Image (cartoon, helix red, strand yellow):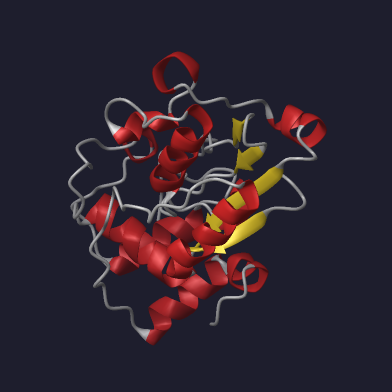
Amino acid sequence: MKFKGRYRYNRQTPCVYENLKVVFHGIPKNASTTIKNALYEAEHGKEFNGNKQWVHKGNEKGGSIYPSLEEIETNYEDYLHLTVVRDPYTRFRSFYSDLFLGMTSIRDNIPPFYIDNNINFLDNSIESVLDIIEYFSDDDADEHFASQKSFLHYHNVHWIEMEHLNEQWSNVCDRLDIAFDPLPVYNKTNNHVMLTDDQKERIFKRYKDDFWSFNYAR
């Protein structure tokens, strides 16, 4: 398999909520839009105005604060560092369905990573997509399939599980002393993609650190 070249693509970097004293380490395909909108509302006392996707944008567009990674390490040690993790198998299904099968309503553009590397979206078999995620390391990968561990830029991050999102989000709300509201899902993807044992083994090898770090069963 040959690609045009190797590129380093930016990751979502941690977002800071100063009134709440929270640093949210967003991971694509892991309810980032949902959590950021909830944190924005708790931080500002009002809903984010406009398309919920724009909450990811910094400052003038989305009103969100994204310090440098160096600042995260040095200036926000006493904040609650928070993320959402997910079973790597279902995260792969979501990534595959969204990017290659076009099963979400919001996917109306192709990310630059795929254009730059001449990746053909018509060749959308699971095997061909597994070839892609195996070929690119986390440093070079598109953010949608880089490992979850690669997004955690702090040594002590509290994680909540996508599989128990509202229950564990309620615990976070208690800790932050904010009102709990059940979380809506903004970018739901059809995850009814069947994986063979061999395909699951390839996913396990690619995301071994995620399985081990977040206690997901092989």
Which of the pair 216/115 is nearer the observer?
216
Q: Is residue 109 above or below residue 29?
A: above
Work out which quarter of the rendered image holds the N terminus and state it: bottom left
Q: Is residue 86 left or right of residue 94?
A: right
Residue 156, how many percent across, how many down? 75, 53
Snapshot quadrant of residue 69: top right
Q: Is residue 152 visible?
A: no
Snapshot quadrant of residue 132: bottom left
Q: Residue furthest top?
A: 60
Q: Is residue 149 visible?
A: yes
- Residue at (62, 47) in percent of width and height: 176
Which of the pair 151/173 is nearer the observer?
173
Q: Is residue 39 left or right of residue 103?
A: right
- Residue at (64, 40) in percent of width and height: 22
- Residue at (55, 66) in percent of width and height: 207
Residue 23, how many percent across, how many down? 64, 39
Residue 43, how many percent across, how many down? 53, 32
- Residue at (73, 40) in percent of width and height: 79
Q: Residue furthest bottom?
A: 197
Q: Is residue 93 left or right of residue 88?
A: left
Q: Is residue 166 above or below residue 142?
A: below
Which of the pair 171/206 is nearer the observer?
171
